[in-house]
Amino acid sequence: MKNTILYEIFEDVIRNGNMDDLKAMNLQVEYPNWQAQFREYADVRQKVSLALRIQKDERNFRQLTDELGGKYFSGNEVSLSILSRMTGSVLFRIAAAMVLVFSCIAVLNFYSDSKFSDQAILADYPLMENSLVRSARPQVNGNEVKVAFADKNYNKVIDLLAPHDLVSFGKPDYILMLGASYYYTGDYDNAIAQYRLLIENNTAYAVDGYMNIALTYIKTQKYQEAVNVLNEGINNPDVADHERLIELKSRLQNPLRRWFE
Amino acid sequence: MNTESQNLNPSFETESGRFLRGIRECSRTVIEEIYRKYSKDIERMIVQNNGTADDAKDVFQEVMISLYRQAHAGLEIRCSFYTFLSLACKKRWLTQLSSKYMSKTQYGEETLPNIVSISEEVNVMLREDDRMKLMMEKLKMMNDGCREVIEMSWQTDKDGKHLGWQEIAGILDVSYAYIRKKASECKSRLIELVKKDYRYNELING
């Protein structure tokens, strides 16, 4: 209530424009803080008054700046820099992802190559042959075939064994040696034919026959034929040792094998 | 030649004065010139300080409106217009950043190395504008009756003339004594509302 009277006085003085009237009023008796109150009143009055006076034009000004803001802050220049930063960021991420992917590919490739390549398989699964002959070379006069095989003289082995009926000869070792000799000389069809003979006539050596045929197919990159012959061996009730066939088949069919070849 | 005669003669008007006059008069040509000349620099500054082109547009507009209001309140710019404008935009952007992302004590030259001291002139202009906004905000919060009385008693025409109390009493169809008392009560309430606001002391003390 006290302030309302004071504000009436302030309003009149401001409207009349004669500030000296205030000093003459001796206001400090009743309003010891009147000067600070006057400053507050005048400040609020001046600002509100101005805001009210310009508020209509301010709306026009705002509309104009809205329009110009849309025109000049289209973000063209800076958005180019944002775009380049974003592009840079995206490119960086793509590059990082590619490095990661290529690293994975390299690891998988290495693993696949060292585990599932033809060379790895053929190294892990040597051809079934008479390895005793090779490791303990007989005397020259003792057995010419075995000596030739031990000396890797495969053509001589073929010359010596091919004319004979090895099945009736009853020496599966000789069939293995002849098959291996064909294999090492690149005559894969004859190698397979020898191993077929082995499978058909000697169940004890049948698993070696299947393995060797499969390995020969792998050597000639006939993988489906290799799988087929392994399946044949696995399903053959006369073959006791299926494990090696199953293992080779699963390795041959592993999805990582030749994934990246 | 003194300042007054310089102001009377447009040929001696500084660029800052010309721009400020153009803003005050809502001159499309001048305002567009300001946008054309300075918008990209302001945009770059804000974008480099964690903002976007949209933030820059808003800050620029806010400062232009502050300039518009304060130009009417008699603002004078003694430095180059660009310096004043860019400092005002930086200050506004800092305020927004501080309210958006961090407490007031956290921001500083470490986080925004490009932003250096803000000139007192800019501070005064922005503070005055903020006080005006605060007062208008509080006026809008008042009931219709009070707001109407205050608006009628304080509003002036272009020549600075007020409506007389008798005139106001006639428009509102109330007695002279009533309108005098009512006006003072409403103004008292308005000043109370303004002073109670937490921002008031900050704006008074800078």
Image (spheres, rainbow, N blue to C red):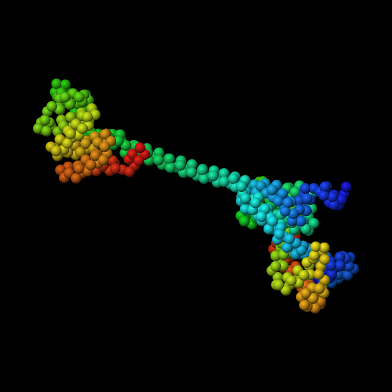
Q: Residue at x 36, y 39 (%)?
A: A260
Left or right: residue A223 compared with residue B104: left
Q: Residue at x 12, y 31 (%)?
A: A166
A40, above or below A96, in the image:
below
Quarter where residue A245 is shown? top left
Question: In this view of the protein, can residue A12 be seen by the observer?
Answer: yes
Q: Residue at x 60, y 47 (%)?
A: A79
Left or right: residue B51 compared with residue A126: right
**Residue B130 x/y as whole percent:** 72, 59
Most extreme residue toward the top, as rendered? Answer: A141
A179, above or below B112, in the image:
above
A120, above or below B34, in the image:
above
Q: How many numbered marks have been drawn onto this rendered protein structure?
A: 0
Left or right: residue A177 compared with residue B126: left
Quarter where residue A7 is shown? bottom right
**Residue A146 x/y as whole percent:** 17, 26
Most extreme residue toward the left, as rendered? Answer: A168
Nearest the viewer among B57 and B89 is: B57
Left or right: residue B93 compared with residue B8: left
B97, above or below A181, in the image:
below
